[in-house]
Amino acid sequence: MRYWSILFAVAAVFSVGAFVYAPFSADWWLPNVAGDPYHVVSTFGKEIDSLYFIILGITGVAFIGTQIVLVWVQYRYVDEIGPDGKPTRPAQYFHGSQRLEVVWTIIPAAILVFLALYQMDTWASIKLRSATPRVPVLAEITGRQFQWVIKYPGPDGKLNTADDLFTVSDLHFVKNQTALIQLKSSDVLHSFFLPQMRIKQDAVPGMTIPVWFDADTAGHYELVCAELCGWGHYKMRGHVTVHETEEEFQKWQADQLAEQNRSQLSMASESQGR
Amino acid sequence: MGADLTANGSHGAAAVPAGGDDHGHSDGHDHIHPAPSNFLSKYVFSHDHKIIGIQFLFSGLIFFVLGGLLAMAVRWQLAWPWKPVPILAKALWSHPALGYQMPPEDYNKLFTMHATIMIFFVVIPLLTGAFGNFLIPLMIGARDMAFPKLNMFSYWFMWPAFIIITYSFFVEGGSAEAGWTSYPPLSVFRWSTPGSLNGQTFWLLALLFAGISSLMGSINYITTIVMLRSPGMKMFRMPMTVWAMFITALLQAFALPVLTSALIMQLLDRTAGTNFFSPVGHTVANSPPVVGGGGPLLFQHLFWFYSHPAVYIMILPGMGIVSDVIATFSRKPLFGYKPMVLAIAGIAGLGFIVWGHHMFQSGMNPQLGATFMLSTMMIALPSAIKVFNWLGTMWGGRIQYTSAMLNAMAFVAMFIIGGLSGIFMAATPVDMHIHDTYFIVGHIHYVLFGGSTFAIFAGIYYWFPKMFGRMMNERLGLIHFFLTFIFFNGTFFLMHIIGMHGHPRRIADPTAYEFLRGAGVTGMNQFMTLSAFGLGLTQLIFAYNFLSSLVVGAEAGPNPWNANSLEWSTASPPPHYNFETLPRVYHAPYEFSVPGVEADFVPQTVPLPRNITLDPVMA
Ligand code: HEM
Ligand SMILES: [Cu+2]
Ligand SMILES: [Cu+2]
């Protein structure tokens, strides 16, 4: 009967094993740039990942410790009947220990308070409005079933003027620059999630929420909707392009604006023709 | 009076009225009601807490089957997106033009109804409804609940809920699909998604009825525990199960009104044109803009103010059950009985001030996030204390590997994982990445399946003999446990990994995103789905064991496990009036292996030997 402990041990080994194996497979690990699975591209991402590793370490030790004790007591304190038909080992009779109780309250409490305080700074610098970077707004992004409507200020740098550029689910910004967006929703809740930059913020009707992030590697990334928003929630995907240089971004913007004007003109002439 | 009692002669319990009790506790409640004589009043509209408990047990298990089937359909879609679900597809999605594919809105319905049914129609009714009703009067030495008729109503108010939630699958637009959290505006605007057409209204009504049922139950539990304990049953002599039920009932009673108000407000928003949860100026689908509105976050605050405590409503009774089971099968006193009670109370108290941890990324003021994070970290503490105490109880014991004990130990092992993953989410910056991903789904299932469900199994294996007078088949029980434990871990553990990889929850097709298209994610999804099917099939063993043991199980006798608490001091199943005379209680129910006592247990009705003095802080 004591071999039931093996079943519990196997489960613990499987759990630990999954996390030990994970770093060896890009698919099993924190999402990062294609081709370089251990390189998180954003400043916040680095802080969040290191916090994640600290917690993984602490919880890992706690997990392995408690599982070892569990498996050990299961193995050791099994009920065995001796040849005389009586238990070979009677159970001990004790009701607890105040000293132990105090020890295993204080140690976890200290660790948890440490964790709570340790991460406050990161949280503050990512989310508090007072930490909003003093940079011009990159874009206003409005979640809508089932796309991200993105409005860039255009060359004049001001939103809601004639040269605003509109894109659908196509987010562009420049490497090593803090991108600041204003997040809105026009119908239901959505959630703006950049897995490779570890950024998540719900878009709430009636609120405008500033969100900021950056990336140290140019390339293509993904924008996910992480809040259930209706039947098409699964496909509310956005493309993210991080440009190598400011010029590249400006050129993209100019091209898009030209395209946008052309289509507006053709629409206007079409309606005149009718 | 005595004549009425003999109606219940079948179990051989001598029908002696308790009128002549010598103790002074008789505030009118130790008189014995006549046993019901016809089928309807005995098994259907019964006032007897034991029958009501068993009614909840059967209802909950039936809904467990439905919830499980829905889960398997969800898993199918995740592993093989848009491939017709075997067997079910032709029946449910009989649209050959779509190739019998599951439409994405139906995927949303499946996970919404799966979660709703599991939480509100399986776990809560089983833990509080079935075990609470059956056990509380028996364990505290009472003849019935304080309000037997209210108790009957608490079960019968579940029926409108059962009927409405089942019917909702067939209304226009189909069942609700806004998730079990039902956040507005998605749940409020009738055209936001098909399930919001009519299904959501039915969902709200079903939950309102289920809530009324719980409220009636909890009032009954509180009153019964405070008023009807038998002589000598001090609060600190109650079994942990009763303590847990008591605190759970308090949680219900305080939190449920808040959920009820939120549900009614949402119902009004949907039907009466109010705008509690829509901001000023909001329009959807060309509706006129809202004037004088509220906000979506209001609903989230109200919802989690109930539902955070509710997640503890789903685990505390389980903690009580496994405490009793572990002590009994370790043949050892529960380690730190009073600290355990305090830990439960601490979880309940803190449970009211941590609801905001579900809203870290919701747009709520991030300053609040910092406070909620601290309180959330603190709630890990009583959970840790409980785990250490369970380990302490087994340490130095004489462990008997019964099905009940194995399920209880699985509760401990799996609850550790659920508790530790909570710490990742409590760390607000880390939560930013893992919120609304499969990491959360992993956490939920380690506490709700690994925790609550293993506790339900432990409880059923443990108290089945008391409920039905027969034993369950141990061999089948062990096989069922073995496979459940393996498949459970196979189904849910890797969710932490894909969640960490960013796999969002509630998406019908993971391959819609490039970073989720890799062989690793796909492989893990398929592995989890196969395990889930294994898990589902394994429950057939349990169903067979449960049903066949009802008929052919060996006779149990009053105390098959040699346990101490009061329910084991009466016949199995207990007679209509529970106890011939109200038992007198001398100590807490955990006096196992007392030195100098021949048997390795001392029932609560038997005094301890004179030379034993109990530690006032621990016992
Ligand atoms: C006592 C047993 C526990 C139960 C029954 C439980 C249950 C749940 C459930 C059902 C959810 C998901 C709700 C949803 O659908 O969004 C959840 C989320 C959460 N739990 Fe637990 N939990 C338990 C223990 C813990 C512990 C010990 C911690 C902290 C150390 C914790 C921290 C969290 C956090 C922070 C979330 C929210 C995560 C997010 O939505 O981003 N939980 N829990
Ligand atoms: Cu969305
Ligand atoms: Cu969405």
Image: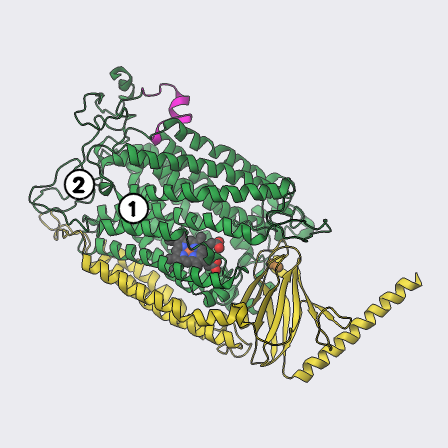
Chain colours: A yellow, B green
Q: What's the chain of the residue with tag 1?
A: B
Q: Is residue B38 magenta?
A: yes
Query: Is residue A28 among what the camera can see?
Result: no
Type of residue at label 2? Answer: His
Residue at point 73%, 78% (across, down): A155
The answer to whether A166 appears left or right of B18 in the picture is: right
Figure quadrant of the N terminus of chain B: top left
The answer to whether B593 appears left or right of B560 in the picture is: left
Q: Is residue B473 magenta?
A: no
Q: CA distance from mark 2 to mark 1?
A: 24 Å
Query: Is residue A12 among what the camera can see?
Result: yes
Q: State yes or no: discs 2 and 1 in contact (Cβ < 8 Å).
A: no
Q: Are marks 2 and 1 on the same chain?
A: yes
User: Residue A30, labelled with which disc?
Assistant: none
From this view, report whether residue A254 is shown above or below residue A146.
below
Magenta-drawn segment? B34-50
- Ligand 2 lies in quarter: bottom right
Residue underneath mark 2: B587
**Element class at badge 1:** helix
Residue underneath mark 1: B404
